[in-house]
Image (cartoon, helix red, strand yellow):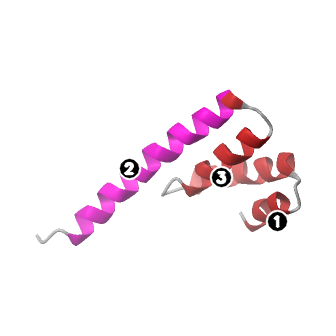
Amino acid sequence: LSLGQAFRQLGRVREAIAQFEKAAGSDVDGSIHYQLFQLHKRVKEEDKANEALKRSMELRKEADKHRVDLIRPP
């Protein structure tokens, strides 16, 4: 993940995408997929960007649901 962020900061978008894709399986809150969305948009890969955004929103919704469950009294 850190390597992906470094590549992104250096403008090495394709390498950043590869690193974030490797990390995508561990995305629990949608943040990695959101990074992929932004990177795919930068290189005009609209279908991949939309896919990543959709998955990001799904994961975010699921993470939010779990947070609410944690704060509800039994």
For the N terminus, the quadrant is bottom right
The segment highlighted magenta reads: 47-71
Q: Are the two marked residues, 3 and 2, in contact with CB atoms closer than 8 angstroms?
A: no
Secondary structure under tag 1 reads helix
Magenta stretch, main secondary structure class: helix
Task: Point out the image quarter for the C terminus.
Answer: bottom left
| Disc number for residue 15 | none
- At horizontal 80% and vertical 38% (from top left) the residue drawn is 43
In the displayed structure, does residue 57 sit left or right of residue 6?
A: left
SS of the residue under disc 3: helix
User: Would residue 70 be counted in the magenta stretch?
Assistant: yes
On the image, the x and y values in percent for residue 28 come to 49, 57
**x, y (%) of residue 40?**
73, 40
Looking at marks 1 and 3 on the same chain, the residue that comes earlier in the sequence is marked by: 1
Mark number for residue 6?
Answer: 1
Report the front residue among 2 and 35.
35
Quarter of the view holding residue 47: top right
In the image: residue 13, left or right of residue 49: right
From the image, tell me which residue sits under label 2: 61
Up/down of 7 relative to 47, above or below: below
Q: Give whichever of discs 2 and 1 has the lower sequence position.
A: 1
Q: Earlier in the sequence, mark 3 or mark 2?
A: 3
Q: Which mark is residue 35?
A: 3
